[in-house]
Structure formats: C-alpha cells, structure tokens
Amino acid sequence: MTGTVTHIYLDEALGQTRVAFICGNGNDALDARDVTPDSIVEIWHRRWDAPTLIGTVHFARVEQLFTTQNRATARLHDDTAISLRLRAKDRPAPGDVCAVTITAAPREDKAWQAVLGARLVSRYGILLPGISGIFRSKGFSLSDNGDAMEAMIEAALPNDFGFIMRSAARLLSIEAMDDEAKALLHAWQTGAKVPSGRMPVASAPYLIHDGGGLAGQIARYAPDAELIEVNESADQHHLTNMLDEAI
C-alpha cells in the first residue's frame, strides 16, 4: 500500500466485483469526479465464477520441497495445487499436513501462492492462530509505544495466539491497538472451522477459515475508509473509466 486509503469504491461490473482503494489527499467528502487513476492505491478483482482463495486459511498436504528455491508444493482439501514460500527456519517434510494462508492468485504458470502458518491480516496487525509470541515490524522505533502495546496484546490474547504489530500500528494509541487485536481475535473465532488448539495436530487437508469474505477483508484492509456513494450514472461511468485506466 503506497498511500493511506481514505475512500473505497465498489464497482459491480459484468461478472465481477471490483474494489478500488483510494487516497483522497485529505478530502473527507470525496466527490466521484475527484478520483483519478493516480489516486487509486489498489484494485481488487472478485470474479463471480471463480471465487478467490486469497486470505483463506487451510490445512494443506505438502508434496515436494525445493529447498534451493525456498519453496514447496502442496494440495488443499479439494485438490487445488498451491506453491508455498518458505523461510529459512521452515522445514516441512513431504506428507506433512500444515496450516497455510493463501496470499496471491495464480498467474501465468504459477499456482496459488501461500505462506506457512495461519494468519488473519489487517492494516495494523497480523493475528497468528496456533503460534505464541508478540512481534513487531522493523518500522517501530525506540520512541514508539511498542513495549506497552506488546504487553497489552499479550494480556488480551489466549496463549495459543500470536500477533505481529505492523508498521502502520506505530501511529495508533495503545488502547486502539488493543481494540485491533481483540477485533482480529473475534473475527477469527467467529469464522474458524477448527479450534486453534487442534491446529498443531492436524492429520488431513481442511478449510480452517474463509478469511471473513470480501466485506471482512475490506474492513480489515482499510478500517477507516469511507464508502463512495454513487447516485448518478455519469459519476458511475467516470469511476468505471478511472478503474479501467488505472488497471
């Protein structure tokens, strides 16, 4: 994300929903005509005939390791192939069933992209079900409230949940960061198909969490953004053209 998202526009195009995240440059009430391709920070596509897996969490069975590439291949419960990005400390073995989070859609000859571990992501934090520990990004400085935030989050979460404080969280108050952690925990517990305590002993591929769907992901990605309401067909046409041009 290259700018602070202040507004959101939902475009119901033929066969797809497009979500435009917009940086309004301080305009609280952004007029549709003020939106330009340069003000559009990011666009999400959601095809109606091909539901997205991005943000969903699964148990997947590891198939092959490619250690020199820091990558592995795996399969979801419905036989969907995924490509896992591995860190140096990740050492899954073929046949293992591991929690994974889908991060990117297939492109060219690549499968769905994923990382090891269950994650629920917001603008300010990342909830880590099944993992203990509170971490912070390198964006925190010594003058930030990182220590106090860590202590508050640790007190708010059960023992089998970890948390990463993202760089954007350094602008939050300690109380707001506490609310953020609790909101992510609630979102996880509301949609979880498997208790977090069972995650380390999984034996078969399975859907763990659907990521909250499109509405939940938008709310976590841009929690403070305003929805642009379009009542005139001319304004809708303008915004659609801006999306096409930005793409």
Image (cartoon, rainbow, N blue to C red):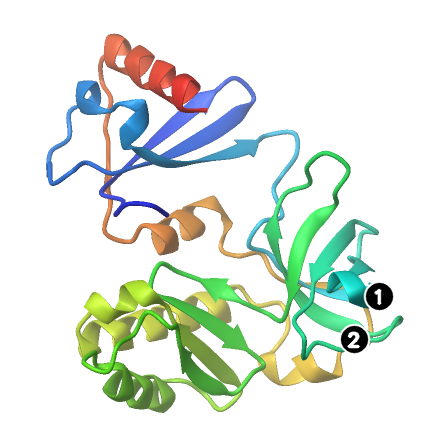
Measured Cα–Cα span from mark 2 to mark 1: 8 Å
Instruction: Measuring from the top left, give residue 244's x and y in whole percent.
Output: 43, 18
Tell me: 145 left or right of 136. Answer: left
**Circle 2: element type:** loop
The answer to which quarter of the image holds residue 95 is bottom right
> In terms of image quadrants, where is residue 167?
bottom left
| Discs 2, 1 touching: Cβ within 8 Å | yes
Is 190 placed above or below 225 here?
Answer: below
Label 1: state its secondary structure: strand
Residue 197 got which mark? Answer: none
Q: Is residue 25 left or right of residue 89?
A: left
Is residue 61 rendered to the left or right of residue 105?
Answer: right
Q: Amino acid at mark 2?
A: Pro
Identity of the residue drawn at 29% across and 13% down = 238
Q: Residue placed at 29% from the left, 63% from the top?
A: 168
Please tell me whether residue 18 is drawn above or below residue 64 in the rendered image.
above
Q: Residues within 10 Å of mark 1 (few under 14, many from 20)?
A: some
Q: According to the image, label 1 marks what residue? A: 65
**Residue 94, position in %: x, y?**
88, 71
Q: Would you place residue 214 above or below residue 30 in this image?
A: below
Image quarter for residue 234? top left
Decide which of tag 2 and tag 1 comes sooner along the chain.
1
Badge 2 is on which residue? 92
